[in-house]
Image (cartoon, coloured by chain):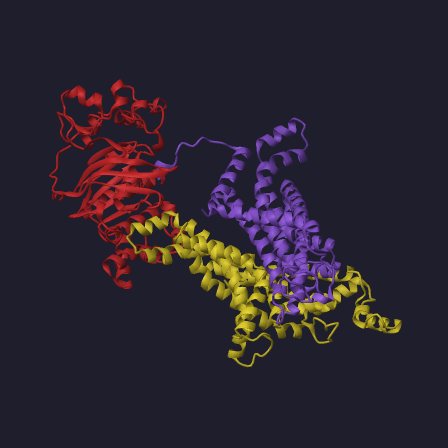
Chain colours: A purple, B yellow, C red
Amino acid sequence: MSAVADPGLPAKTGRALLIAQALKAFRANKLSSVGVVIFLTVVVLALLAPIIAPHDPLEQNILHRMEDPSAEFWLGTDSYGRDILSRLLYGARISLFIGVAAIGSAMLIGSTIGLYAGYRGGKVDAVIMQAMDVLLAFPALILGLVIVAMLGPSIQNLIIAISLTAIPPFARIARAPTIVVKERDFVEACRALGFNDTRIMLLHVLPNILSEILVMGSLWLATAIRVEASLSFIGLGVKPPTATWGGMIREGFEKILDTPWLSVFPGLAILLVVFSLNLIGDGLRDVIDPKTRTD
Amino acid sequence: MLAYVARRLLLAVPTLLAVMTLVFVLVRIVPGDPAQTILGDQASQEALMAMRERLGLNRPLWEQYIDFLRDALSGDWGNSMVTGHPILQEILNVLPYTIDLTVASLIIGALFGIPLGVWSALHRNRLVDYVTRVGSLLGLSFPAFVSAILLLLVFSIELNWFPVISAGDRSSVGEVLENLALPAINLGLIMTAYITRVTRSSMLNVLGEDYIRTAHAKGLPNRAVIWIHALRNALIPVVTVVGLYLGILIGNSVLTEIVFNRPGLGKLIVGALSQRDYTMLQGLMVIYTFIIIIVNLLTDLTYGLIDPRVKYS
Amino acid sequence: MARRPANGQAPAQFALDVRGLTTSFYVGGKWFPAVRDVSFALKRHETLALVGESGCGKSMTAMSIMGLVPKDAGRVKAEAILFEGQDLARASEAKMREVRGDGISMVFQEPMTSLNPVLTIGFQVSEALRHHRGLSRRDAAARALHILDQVKIPSAKSRFNDYPHQFSGGMRQRVMIAMALACQPKILLADEPTTALDVTIQAQILELLRELKRETGMAMIFITHNLGVVAELADRVAVMYAGQIVEIAEVAELFARPTHPYTEALLRSIPRSDRDTAELYTIPGQVPPITRMPPGCKFADRCAYRLDRCQAEEQQLAPLAKAPAHAVRCWRRTEETQPEMVVVDA
């Protein structure tokens, strides 16, 4: 096979190449683009919810209880006569906010822990990573369940619980390249030039792990949204009457024999967002790790 | 190998101890008085004092800790704060349901996921591969309760093929299977999605290996190359991933048990959490940790079955 | 090169007759040949060495003969590849599977990765016997054990159920050879079988191959970049450069009269004990990538004897007047000896 080893491509390195590759892969991988379009649409709809929602999501209307989809209520109404579509739009805000905040902080805290553990090495590293492994071994949903139950259900506590479950994978991603970079000669040289260690690590490690963190981020955002919905469904999420997708399904599930769409519509909404994020993550991963390339 | 298993279990003791300590601490730093929770808002001061006494809540923390550990090790996990039944008994009562569900989903996942993954890899970039990839990605995007609700709607409510409530009766194999079918299909489909994906990518890696070329050079028929030479190697990462996803499976079983109203650890933990049944919660966390340790051990033992390079020493 | 009858049938003295073999790869939307118009005949019981730097198409030539070039990336075309009265270039995949591992076997370069790590060596050696000969598990095992003894695996019987990782590199290569020889093939393609091994082990494996060849009378195509090995083992040598044969001759003739400038340069770059290694000659430049093959002579860029004509037009492989069995692909050398020479062999 040696004959095809060198097709004569110019050797490019660094971030420019990565971005170019990402764009190319996204162009090639139509599914990822579909994912991006779906996700961005949901984000825009969520942001515009106060403007575009046809009704107040909390407004009860006893004259229009559990109505089928109609011109006024596109997706019907729930048992309090609230407009499902409006509740879905507002629910998207909660889901996305909790997901993004939880995964954002998990990224930040996780990579800091990983950087620190990798940089310190030795016993500190061993203890931290052992703790991370134990945390990772626990089912995310069970862990989230227990933490939220302990802290009490509120948006803030949901964010804490979900981000705690998502910290270990980010710590792992950050740690591996830190150990490699630490051993390189230029770190000594930087130190000799008077750069401090934090700055050296940030400058040299961050660019290495950024892409991988983004992939992990999109996949874990999908998980976070799923876990949040699951917690709300169990009854440990944001308290009613606030509209959340999981909560809507919970309420709808009680009436499943009469009006299945009450739980089906929010269920499909969650599915759509999680699926779009998985499509994006999958496409991004192909760019970064050609070994698992799917096309 | 027995020695290996024994040593692994011994090594698990510190982990279990750590989890128990953590649970013990967590339960006690949580705001809210368990005695109050149990007796309700209307309880008298005397009743509250008596309840605290009975629960040992007014003794020094370290004493409670020692007692807790000693009792736990001797198999006395205390009684539920809510029902008063022994914790261990309650857990062991529902454990078979959760184990049935997990094992059945795993079997479904492997039965469908492995052939699908292989098939997809062999038809790389053709239509079937495309469909399988999108399908499996969609499958693992399903929150377990959404898929459960859809299955319930279609197969129990519309078609009336399965019972709406999968509760209880374990008197005959038929009953067990009938109650198990839909919940197991629900989790099994999600598991299938995971296993399909990892089998596909692992198979693609293996098909590029030198020893596959060697097998072709021997003139073996394609099916021998794929099912004897490639699959066995491709299964090694599948085992890793399955071990990891068992955690997700156990988490998802909570949701499945709720939707199908099926007894199990998941329903027990949700009940314990909503009623602040701390002794039950302690017991459940220890059981979960124990299950995870066993799963990891089984995963490592499975490697040995597939990969002769793995040594238990 | 001697003309052969073009009746589609290989003369009886040929074990394999390859004519006009071209193997192309699909790179960036276009097909590029990695092996171009290679023709040679392998006589019965003969060892033909294919020599050249890495990337010159030697391995790909062997893979093409075996029908092992991946279909999605590569395309094999040939006028004919004649083996035992069949044209392998036109054989179905099913037919090729019958030939592979039975009539023609191959030993690969990497003993560490070419054996399946999860199957016992006993299984892997007896597999071909069970498949091609329809032997029972037990008969195949008995025969496999015999071959493992033949390739000198110490205490083969007790190691029959061991896995590849329990063997050293040299021992694994012996297992590979045993696997290849299981069905007593007419032809063995050995693709740099010793390159990945230590020097002492290399010598042992070469000795083993020589012995086995004497015992079985099979023909062998031995692929190597090491001319030292060629001198020890081969009857004839084909030197390849950039996917083409640039010179082919009997081994003694080639070493006595290296004619193509590339062959000459290769010979000068062999380390020799009677010379200081510090003066070791290296050929300047490198093989052009298949996507950027120059017109004319592919070696012209690196050639010290280059004429203007070399870069414009390609010479065909043409026999020397004084030694008809010695053919060279070089304007300068063929014209120096016989200026009016007309190209005959395509």
Drawn side of residue C281 relative to residue B243, left or right:
left
Answer with the quarter of the image where residue B8 lies: bottom right
Q: Where in the figure is residue A59, as x and y percent of width and height?
A: 74, 60
Drawn side of residue A60 relative to residue A20, left or right:
right
Q: Is residue B177 above or below residue C322?
A: below
Q: Where in the figure is residue B199, as x and y percent of width and height?
A: 46, 55
Drawn side of residue C291 relative to residue B137, left or right:
left
Q: Residue at x 15, y 26 (%)?
A: C320
Q: Residue at x 86, y 71 (%)?
A: B49
Q: Is residue C88 above or below residue B185?
A: above
Residue B283 visible here = no
Q: Where in the figure is residue C267, as x and y percent of width and height?
A: 27, 27
Q: Is residue C193 above or below residue C134?
A: above
Of residues A94 and A190, which is closer to you in this image?
A: A94
Residue B158 visible here = yes
Q: Where in the figure is residue A164, as x and y percent of width and height?
A: 67, 52
